[in-house]
Structures are given as structure tokens and as C-alpha cells.
Image (cartoon, grey):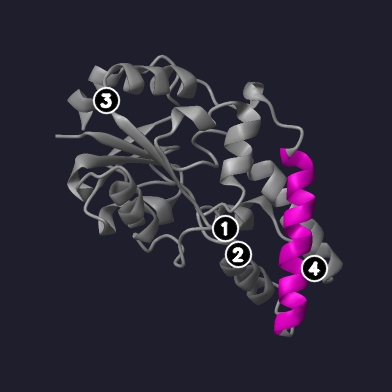
Amino acid sequence: MIKGFLFDLDGVIVDTAVYHYQAWRRMANELGFDISEEFNETLKGISRMDSIARILEHGKVSLPEERILELAKLKNEWYLEEVEKMTSANVLPGIQELISQLKAGGYKISLGSASKNAPKILERIGLAPEFDAIVDGNSVKKSKPDPEVFIKGAEALNLKNEECLVIEDAFAGIEAAHAAGMKAIGIGTKENLPNADLILASFEEVKLEDLFKEL
């Protein structure tokens, strides 16, 4: 019996992927190399520091810890410049309607995101009051596919793991959900998310009862 929903943020509630890509690419360019949009896809769902490690490995660049921390701070500043411009218009199609259905049905909802900027983004788009709990990069130590973020999400809602359903757009996020003993709905394609229990292109015109029929 599902009693709670755990939402990823980027690519599920809002699409900030382009902002991340612009900031990561700017960082890579300053280090003398470039990254493609395809490479940027591999960074979805993982933490800022793990993303930097992958980018540096990709560019075959080795840096001291102090410089890495400096770059992490810079990247976040570049990203937040774009976040400050966000409004409710940035909420992806169908999400507001889905949340309304969940609240009306008595379901609990939590955020489960690697982003340390999640609270700020939810405030900017006007959805912060809708969430019963927020578990983000400030409250977890391990990145997806480690299940920590979703395990803590269930705990924050006072639910068992198996009582929670995860909504994700990243392969690593689906893996994290399964590692926590939860089913996961993937937002994307079968090619990108072959491990999802159910795949949707978006939540536009999706009814809650139909979801449960398909899972």
C-alpha cells in the first residue's frame, strides 16, 4: 500500500538541466576543455562534488583539493544566477496537478534530491508549502545510486520504505529507489531508464488512479 511519494527535483518538478550544463561547461572551459550535452546526462542525480570528479576525469585534469572546492563554489554561484530568475512558470507540465491529487488523496510527499539548492528552488517556484519533508544534498552524505536520500525521505514521512513510491528522471535515481526497496516511476524514455517500474514522458493529464493500475 503506497502512502507516500518521494520526488526528485531536477527533471521531475523543474528542468534546471540546462542551467547545470551551462555552469559545468563554463567550468570545464576555464580548465581548457569542453563537455557535451551527452556527457552532462551522466551527471544527473549525483552530487556536486561527484560531478566535479567526473568532469575532471573526463578532461584528464588533476587539481588540488583547495582548487576543487573553489570551483564547486563558483559553479554554484553561476547556477544560482539562473535559479534566481525562476518562477512558477518553470514547474513542469502536470506536476502541480499531480501534487494537488496527492494532497486531496491524503498522501504524504517529500523531496529526495541531491541538490543543495532544492529549498531555494521550491521557494522560487511556489511549491515549498506543499511538501511534508525535504531531504536534499544538505542532509545526506552519499549520492545516488546510494539509497540514503530515499531512506531518509521515508523516515521523514514516518513511513516504511515499501510504502513510498519514487519519481525520478535519472538512472542512478531509479537504482537508489530500488536499493531502498521502493518502486520507481521514471520520467523519460525506455532507452534512458530501462530500470524504471513505469515510464512516463511527463505527468501531463495523468490521473493518480491510472498510475496505480500500471504499476
The amino acid marked with disc number 1 is Leu
Asked if residue 68 is among those painted magenta in the image, a careful observer would answer yes
Q: Which mark sits nearer the N-terminus, 4 or 3?
A: 4
**C-alpha distance separating marks 3 and 2:** 33 Å
Q: Which amino acid, by three-letter code, is at mark 3?
A: Leu
Give coordinates of residue 147: x percent, y percent.
Answer: 34, 59
Q: Nearer the viewer, mark 4 or mark 3?
A: 3
How far, Cα to Cα, is label 1 from label 3? 28 Å
- Label 4 packing within 10 angstroms: few (<14), some (14-19), many (20+): some
**Residue 30 in the figure: left or right of residue 5:** right
Badge 1 element: loop
Q: Is residue 125 magenta?
A: no
Q: What is the three-letter code of the residue carrying label 4?
A: Phe
Q: Which residue position is annotated with label 4?
A: 33
Mark before the other along the chain sequence, 2 or 4: 4
Residue beneath disc 1: 43
Report if the CB atoms under discs 2 and 1 are less than 8 Å apart.
Answer: yes
Residue 2 at what x, y percent from top left? 20, 34
Q: Which mark is residue 211?
A: 3
Give the x, y percent position of residue 96: 48, 20
For the question of whether residue 142 can be seen, the reply is yes
Whichever of labels 2 and 1 marks the residue nearer the N terminus, that label is: 1
Dominant SS type (magenta)? helix
Q: Residues within 10 Å of mark 1 (few under 14, many from 20)?
A: many
Q: Residue at x 31, y 44 (%)?
A: 196
Q: CA distance from mark 1 to mark 4?
A: 17 Å
Q: Is residue 126 above or below residue 135?
A: above
Residue under pointer 2: 51
Q: Which residues are magenta?
A: 65-83
